[in-house]
Image (cartoon, rainbow, N blue to C red):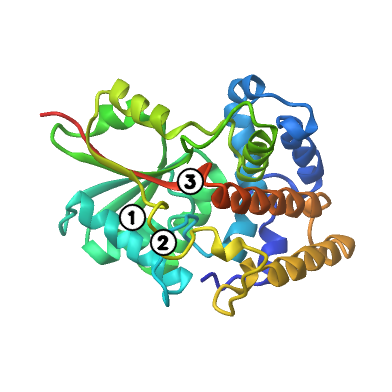
Amino acid sequence: MSKTGSLDLASNLGGNIDKSDVLTAVEKYEQYHVFHGGDEEERKANYTDMVNKYYDLATSFYEYGWGESFHFAHRWKGESLRESIKRHEHFLALQLGVKPGQKVLDVGCGIGGPLREIARFSNSSVTGLNNNEYQITRGKELNRLAGVDKTCNFVKYGCYKEIFRVLKPGQCFAAYEWCMTDAFDPANAQHQKIKAEIEIGDGLPDIRLTSKCLEALKQAGFEVIWEKDLAEDSPVPWYLPLDKNHFSLSSFRLTAVGRFITKNMVKVLEYIRLAPKGSQRVSDFLEKAAEGLVDGGRREIFTPMYFFLARKPE
């Protein structure tokens, strides 16, 4: 898990946004979302601005609470959250058949936790593709600290069609996508509320159905080898670390008690001006995301683990 402390959280909060502009950025970000009068079309039209504001504001919270790998994982009983995350990163490398010395693209790499783990596991060279300058800068620093800066790097990226374009024929693309499942009912107000909570708390303009994700892959030109919602048969619910009824010392910062302490710590840090004004608001919409993720997981209308392995035809 992350070794960052409260002062790291405070000093890094806001990313590349000037500390005096954090509150304004929070207000603008919130306005894109349903709870503050925004709509999907506006979010899509202003996608770059919305997403960059979100990751500048939220990344230090992610690293503080979740570690360097910002994803969920299929989890066995008796397995810690960190162990399950590492195992799934190895699973991805094995599914792709990554060999020593090969070049790999990590699309949507965050600050590069999976990138570094896969590079060490497979002895490969991994380039992380990201659209947020702060995460790229932070990832490069973590690469240097981990001693993989000679074989791992970061660049900005596009989407499925761009990935298809840059892949060599016969090479593979594997990913986990956050999707609404077939159980999601757009006419159900509670389902829509949960979807909106996840969108505002995770910087998403929209969350596609798994079927739409598959369709987009095929439209880009990929041949889908196999796909599955890996959350369906996970012995331990993927949302357990965020469940208020669950307590764990190994992932304490993610528990209800840990999040309560973090929320009040951020309140104090903002009050004494070690954290910029608006920090509490970021903490609030991240808490809203946690609630939406747990509710979506329990109702099985949302998955953060729709996995696919696809190939660019020869």
Q: Is residue 159 visible?
A: no
Give the left or right position of residue 301, taking residue 103 as reference. Answer: right
Give the left or right position of residue 274, taking residue 172 as reference. Answer: right
Label 2, residues with CA under 10 Å away: few <14, some 14-19, many ≥20:
many
- Residue reaching furthest bottom? 249
Residue 66 image point, x, y percent: 55, 63
Q: Which residue is mark 2?
A: 143
Mark 2: amino acid: Asn
Q: Which residue is mark 3?
A: 303
The answer to which of marks 3 and 2 sits earlier in the sequence is 2
Residue 121 image point, x, y percent: 26, 66
Which one is nearer the viewer's eye here, 23 or 80?
80
Q: Can you tell which quarter of the image residue 100 is in? A: bottom left
Q: Can you tell which quarter of the image residue 60 is in? A: bottom right
Q: Tell me the quadrant of the picture where the C terminus can be found.
A: top left
Query: In the displayed structure, would residue 165 be above or below residue 78?
Result: above
| Spatial CA span between label 3 and label 1 | 29 Å
Which one is nearer the viewer's eye here, 196 or 107?
196
Residue 232 image point, x, y percent: 40, 51
Give the left or right position of residue 185, taking residue 105 as reference. Answer: right
Residue lying at 42% horizontally and 77% vertically, measured from the top left? 78
Q: Which residue is mark 1?
A: 152
Mark 3: amino acid: Thr
Q: Is residue 164 visible?
A: yes
The answer to which of marks 3 and 1 sits earlier in the sequence is 1
> Are dots 1 and 2 in contact, CB under 8 Å?
yes
- Residue 119 bears which disc, if any? none
